[in-house]
Image: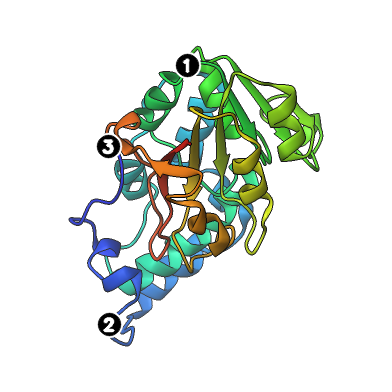
């Protein structure tokens, strides 16, 4: 399952922003307070546990929309939005920013040997490795074995690309206003594919100078993903995009 499903209450708002003031009775407020109580409560959520199980055993049974409902997200759209915001905070702390889907992992595996730059905790690379991909995870500041899902090698992005010639490149959520993803794209060999998971021009990932490379040294090649994409929390607009180095 990819992208967003409009049938759930937190999808009913424009860009995830509530259109009305919240009106919550005591029962709803109590449910919300329980959801937001602490990390120990959140850690037991089916959504988080389902993703962790996928990472640990490679069984691609992760259905984010269904698991979000099973996690007890309230039906009230305003309360649901708040609860999902808290759920996302815990998800980021445990796994990183992007919520991969089985379809996306399958599409990335089909690219052949890949290099992930800015891998963070290495969760995406772990999913790829579990699915049989030949993947190398790198990051300028690895978080250490006790905080990572896979061995993440210490390396600056452009250096990693030059040292692992012949691989396509993946980058998930390049840092806001960071230009290193732009430099990394320039370092790639012609013909290689770059997958970027992040928001578009003016968004919360990378720098707009990356998009200025289109038509100069990069061209879109969405066909390599076959429509596969990440799953999104409310008000988050990241997507997986594919680029070919010219």
State the CA–CA distance, disc 2 to disc 3.
Answer: 30 Å
Residue denoted by label 1: 131
As helix, strand or loop, the secondary structure at mark 3 comes to loop
Mark 1 vs mark 3: in front:
3
In the image, 163: left or right of 202? right
Q: Name the image quarter holding the N terminus.
A: top left
Residue 147 in the image: state x and y as whole percent: 75, 37
Q: Name the residue at 67% across, 28% down.
A: 137
Whether residue 128 appears in this view of the structure is: yes
- Residue 188 lies in quadrant: top right
Residue 206 in the image: state x and y as whole percent: 59, 58
Q: Local crowd at mark 1 within 10 Å, few (<14), some, or many (≥20)?
A: some
Residue 109 in the image: state x and y as whole percent: 45, 20
Of callouts 2 and 1, the N-terminal one: 2
Q: Local crowd at mark 2 within 10 Å, few (<14), some, or many (≥20)?
A: few
In the image, 70: left or right of 34? left
Up-down relation of residue 111 to residue 246 (above or below): above
Q: Name the residue at 52% across, 62% down.
A: 86
């Amino acid at each position: 399952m990819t992208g967003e499903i409009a049938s759930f209450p937190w999808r009913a708002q424009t860009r995830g922003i509530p259109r009305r003031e919240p009106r919550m009775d005591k029962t709803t407020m109590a449910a919300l307070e329980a959801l937001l109580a602490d990390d120990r409560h959140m850690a037991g959520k089916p959504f988080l546990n389902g993703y962790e199980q996928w990472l640990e055993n490679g069984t691609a049974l992760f259905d984010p929309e269904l698991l979000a409902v099973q996690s007890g997200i309230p039906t009230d759209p305003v309360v649901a939005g708040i609860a999902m915001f808290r759920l996302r905070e815990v998800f980021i702390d445990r796994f990183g920013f992007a919520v991969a889907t089985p379809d996306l992992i399958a599409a990335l595996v089909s690219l052949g040997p890949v290099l992930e730059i800015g891998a963070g905790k290495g969760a995406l690379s772990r999913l790829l490795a579990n699915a049989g991909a030949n993947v190398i995870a790198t990051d300028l500041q690895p978080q250490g074995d006790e905080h990572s899902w896979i061995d993440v090698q210490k390396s600056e992005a452009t250096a990693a690309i030059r040292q692992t010639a012949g691989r396509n490149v993946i980058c998930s959520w390049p840092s806001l206003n960071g230009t290193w993803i732009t430099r990394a794209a320039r370092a790639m060999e012609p013909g290689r594919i770059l997958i970027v998971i992040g928001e578009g021009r003016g968004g919360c990932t990378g720098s707009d100078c990356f998009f200025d490379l289109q038509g100069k040294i990069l061209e879109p090649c969405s066909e390599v993903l076959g429509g596969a994409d990440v799953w999104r929390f409310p008000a988050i607009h990241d997507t997986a995009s594919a680029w070919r180095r010219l």
